[in-house]
Structures are given as structure tokens and as C-alpha cells.
Image (cartoon, rainbow, N blue to C red):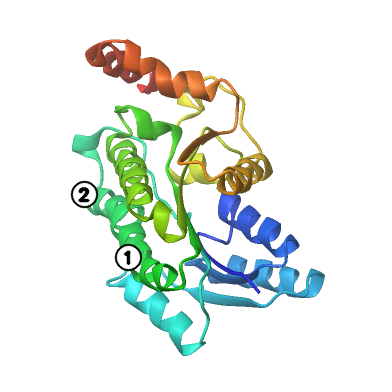
Amino acid sequence: MTTALITGAASGIGKTFACQLAAQNFDLVLVDRDTSSLDKIAQTLRETTSVSVETMAIDLTAPDPGDRVFDFTQKKEIAIDWLVNNAGLGDYGDFASSDRHRQLEILQVNILALVDLTHRFLTPMLKQRSGVIINLGSIASFQPMSYWATYAASKAFVLSFSEALRAEVRDRGVKVLALCPGPTKTPFFDRAHFPDNTRPMGLPLADPETIVCQAIAAVEADKQTIVAGNPLLNFVANAPRFIPREWVVELIERQFRDV
């Protein structure tokens, strides 16, 4: 039986990964800080599927989350075949007046916890010469974004890190995918305090089911990166390469300014 560990599994894209992988007979380890929602999705999957579902309630902003999650799977004697680093934080607003601790939490979850978990679970994957790692980037991975500066920079890291890592391990049995969704119907915009007039870049919101279906298909096709959601997003992601970078940044600043 294949086992997937999913962070941020209690809602949105993470929850959808859990449902779709369970439908494909994956056993699951679901990680989230929202204990109530985590327990609900786990109970639903236990009642509607035949797969094993383990849960771990943990805030990935806590110290050494990778150690704690890895130790949890070791004590349960669970080998992880798929790692879905889905958990992420964002925060809209002027950087200078933002909460400093919130900015550091974004880096902790989006970068440090992701790298930590990847390093922890990659080693056993390489030993067994098989495994899949899906790291959640964003359409924001492809350009700087004012009023969303820390988030966009963290997602640029995820894209670069994932593509570089894939080149290192692709001939050793492990697949690495940078999944870069566009605006999606999840609680993210509300949690990141986005004002209505700046979202979601004038594009329709994609369903999480669409994002996850495209991600699973990309893994099967052994793709390096996928811009998921609206078909127009590939143009949005690639167009800045042909425009002076200063122009791109200025255009985005105007678009995302809360006026």
C-alpha cells in the first residue's frame, strides 16, 4: 500500500489531495494545526474508504516540526511514499507596517518546514529508490509581488528549490514536482487578509479538485513544474520573462495596492 503524508490537510488543496489519494487507495498521514477540522476529514475518510488514516495536529511554526513529524511516522512504523508539502501562510499588506512575527512565520512554514520535511523524508525514499515529493509553489512564484512580498518571495524559493532538487534525484527513483496553482477556491485569501478589490488578479477561481487532478497527472507524466488552474495562467507566469522586470514590478504594485 502506498502512503502519502500531506501537510495543511484540513482544508483547501490539502484536504482535496487527501480525498483524491484516498480514492486511489493511498493510506494517509494528515498533518495540520486545526485539530477539529483534521479529525473531521479523517473520520469521513475512515467511514467512506478502506484506507488507513493517521493524523498529527502540529503547528509548523513550532520549533523543529520536521523532527516531530518524522518521529511520529517512525514510531508508527509508517513509510512515506508521497510527501505533499501543501501547508502555507500568506499575509497581504504594506511590509513596513506588517506584523514582524507574522512575516517570520510565513518563512518558517513556506520555506523552513518544507525544506526540513523534504530532507527528512527524501533519504528513505532514495534508499528505496522510489517516492514522490510535491511542493506547493504558486503563480506568485514567478515574479515579485508588492504587498505580498514575503509570500511571493517564499514561493519563488519553493519553485527554485524544487526544480533544483528534481535534477539531483530524478535518476535515483524520486519524482519532485513544483505545483504552482493560480487563484483557487480555498480559505487562503480570507486568512491572508486580502481586500476584495485586489483579488484574485482578475482571474476566475479554480476548484481545488482541478488543481489536484492536474498535479497527479503531472506526477504521472514526470513533469518538473506545473502552473495549475486556469489555462491563461501559463501566459501570466511566462509573460514577465519578455518584459523589463522593473515594469512588471510596477504593474503588480498598482494592481495589488489597496485603493
Residue located at (31% from left, 19% from top):
253
Query: In this view, which residue lies farthest toward the front?
Result: 171
Q: Which mark is residue 119?
A: 1
The three-letter code of the residue at mark 1 reads His
Residue visible at 28% across and 72% down? 64
Q: What residue type is labelled 2?
A: Arg
Q: Where is residue 96 in the image (x, y as percent from the top left)?
A: 18, 36
Determine which residue is flagged by label 2: 100
Say few, some or many: other residues with alpha carbon within 10 Å of mark 2 (under 14 / 14 to 19 / 20 or more): few
Residue 41 appears at what percent x and percent y?
Answer: 67, 66
**Horizontal and vertical percent for residue 24?**
72, 61
Pointer 1 or 2: first along the chain: 2
Q: What element carries label 1?
A: helix
Instruction: From the top left corner, tell me how far across and down residue 124 is, in percent.
Output: 41, 73
Work out which quarter of the rendered image holds the C terminus and state it: top left
* Residue 250 seen by the camera: yes
The nearer-to-camera label among 1 and 2 is 1
Vertical placement of residue 193 versus 9, above or below: above
Q: Which residue is drawn at 59% across and 32% down?
A: 229
Between 9 and 90, the one lying in front of the other is 9
Q: In which quarter of the image is residue 60?
A: bottom left
Closer-to-camera residue (179/35): 179
